[in-house]
Amino acid sequence: RGMPQVLEVFHLPKQDRMTQMEVGRRGIEPGFDAQRPPFREPRSQLVFANDLSEALADICELFVDGRKRQSAILTRDRAAPVTVLRDMWSVRAQVATGAVVAGAGAVAMAGVLPAIHDYTYPVVWWGLLLILDAWNWRRRGQSLWRAEPRRFFAITLPVSVLFWLLFEALNLRAPQWRYRGSIEGLHRQVFFGFTSFATVVPIVMECWWMLGGAACVPRALEEFARRHKPRLVVTGLVLLAIPFVNSVFWFNQGMWLAPALLLLPFAAVRTCPTPQPFAAGWVAGSIMAGLLWEAINFPAKTGWEYLVLPQAPHLFEMPLPGYAGFIPFGLSVLAVWEWQRRLPARPPIAVLLYAAALAALYALAPRLL
């Protein structure tokens, strides 16, 4: 048989169109959104402004234009699987929920809703994460929780908290920032810390996916990390030790790269066919995450302020040279993300990680907040 007959069997009327796919534990369901592939590969050129403008337009489309897209699906094929429609509605619900949550946090920043005034930073961020994740799921096929919800809640969240607490411990020895706010009570401080620090890894990965697609590294970097494991591990440990014996700001900045050197040699990261997706996700995604961090922190009642480079020009609370630090930090987040994906999402592992994260928060929170 020829290709037209094969396509007819699978209800694919046009050979040059891409079908929508719903991949899960129960198999693969074909969809029928022929207007646009649901998952796009990164562009071969770095046109970040166009990516961001298209992202905003598509986020609005997910929420506002859902009925139009549903009608188009049903018109193209009356036998469209229920799973496709269910996924579409779940994405719309996720965007709507994120908008409500982020909006509530923004209103609280203006002095309304005093009940959550002290917690506006994590409230706004969790709302934005819902929106960013919906966009990445529809356009990139990437999601923090849709593919493996158990892993996200059992492993990713406590690992993100522990990851950031490493830098908080280093900062106590050689302070670069401090927290402002008036959260009283140890339990409330721990709650703020957990809900805030649990967003660190998710934020960077969502920004990486948005601008670069699926996370990957150049083959040369992957081979270099594999060949030089001992040297990279020793270098990472040295960079983590420097803040304990040194108070000069510039000499301590290697700590942002240290987790990447320690974990990347042991993480099974997908390799990129070209360096452009890696550059887009790593550099542009890390800077985007940093800008959003600082923009949301600036009006928040409970947030941070910097103790270094007071004479340098600032954008929000951050001195402008400090934004360069988000680039090595983004690579460290990628290493942590890939490393935690190798941990089994089993209850004993989750209990251990949550116990360690909460114990560290209870020990450090009185000195942080």
Image: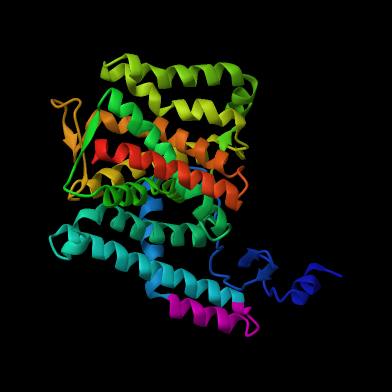
Asked if residue 347 lies in the magenta stretch, the reply is: no
Indicate whether 28 appears above or below 65.
above
Q: Which residue is at 19% across, 46% downward? A: 298
Between 77 and 157, the residue placed more toward the observer is 157
State whether residue 107 appears in this view. Answer: no
Quarter placement of the N terminus: bottom right
Q: Which residue is at 43% across, 72% downward? A: 92
Left or right, 290 with respect to 46, comes to left
Q: Which quarter of the picture shows residue 224?
A: top right
Between 93 and 352, the residue placed more toward the observer is 352
Q: Which quarter of the picture shows residue 80?
A: bottom right
Q: Which residue is at 61% across, 40% downward? A: 270
Q: Which residue is at 14% across, 65% downward? A: 112
**Residue 144: x, y in percent?**
50, 54
Quarter placement of the C terminus: top left
Left or right, 197 with respect to 17, comes to left
Magenta region: which residues? 66-82
**Residue 277: x, y in percent?**
51, 41
**Residue 88: x, y in percent?**
51, 73
**Residue 155: x, y in percent?**
52, 48
Between 236 and 72, the residue placed more toward the observer is 236
Q: How is the image coloured?
A: rainbow
Indicate whether 201 appears above or below 264.
below
How many numbered discs sit on the rendered protein? 0
Left or right, 97 with respect to 221, comes to left
Mainly helix, strand or loop, the magenta region?
helix
Asked if residue 77 lies in the magenta stretch, the reply is: yes
State whether residue 291 appears in this view. Answer: yes
